[in-house]
Structures are given as C-alpha cells and as structure tokens.
C-alpha cells in the first residue's frame, strides 16, 4: 500500500505551518483540547501529558496548522498514522481486511 503514497513537500510551506503549530500549541483552545485527555483516533483516556498535536492532513501533504486540521493524539496513534491522509488510512484498513 505504501508504494503509491508520493510525498513532495514544500519546505517553505512546512516551515510556515510548523511555526503556526507552535503558536497554536500555546493557545487556550488547544489547552482545552488537551485537558480532555482523550486521543482523537482511539478514544482512550491517556491524560493531557500523553497527547501530541497531530495534523489530520499532514503538513508535508499540504495540510495547515489550524483548528480544523489539528487533533490531540496519543503517541501510538500518531506514530501509526505517520504521513497519511484520512482517505489513505481508510484504504489501508480496508486492504488489511481484504475488502479491496
């Protein structure tokens, strides 16, 4: 499945969005997201200290650092997702289940 994922990231876009992500991490909105202590992907209660900021559409794939594209994720889910988009995650899961 990974053989068709092609990533051509724009270094300027990535640098710009990483700076926006740093600012977003300091916002009251993000603090409220972390205070829930729940991973967006697996739904586990892991506590705010165990959550990371994950871009749903990865910055390297053109995603932006805004409230509509970032979610709190546990380290396991964030590592498992890697640089895939939501559609790629769904397709990979279907492939694993033999439905593609």
Image (tube, grey):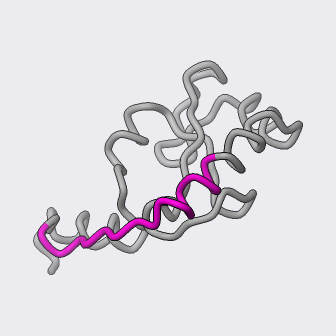
**Side of 3 relative to 16 (left or right):** left
**Side of 41 relative to 8 (left or right):** right
Which residue is pictured at 62% across the width and 21% down the height? 47
Along the line of sight, the residue nearer the viewer: 97 or 78: 78
Q: In the rendered image, which quarter contains the C terminus?
A: bottom left
Which residue is pictured at 77% across the width and 41% down the height? 23
Along the line of sight, the residue nearer the viewer: 7 or 91: 7
Q: Position of residue 53 (x, y in %)?
A: 59, 41
**Side of 32 relative to 34 (left or right):** right
The relative height of residue 33 versus residue 60 in the rendered view (above or below) is above
Along the line of sight, the residue nearer the viewer: 4 or 45: 4
Q: In the rendered image, which quarter contains the N terminus?
A: bottom left
Numbered-mark total: 0
Which residue is pictured at 64% across the width and 56% down the height? 16
Q: Position of residue 92 (x, y in %)?
A: 23, 66
Which residue is pictured at 73% across the width and 37% down the height? 25
């Amino acid at each position: 499945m990974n053989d068709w994922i092609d990533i051509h990231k724009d270094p300027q876009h990535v640098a710009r969005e990483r700076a926006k992500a740093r600012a977003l991490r300091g916002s009251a909105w993000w603090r409220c997201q972390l205070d829930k202590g729940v991973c967006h992907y697996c739904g586990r209660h892991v506590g705010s200290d165990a959550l990371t900021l994950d871009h749903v559409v990865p910055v390297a794939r053109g995603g932006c650092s805004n409230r509509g594209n970032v979610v709190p994720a546990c380290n396991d889910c964030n590592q498992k997702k890697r640089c895939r988009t939501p559609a790629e995650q769904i397709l990979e899961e279907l492939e694993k289940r033999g439905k593609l």
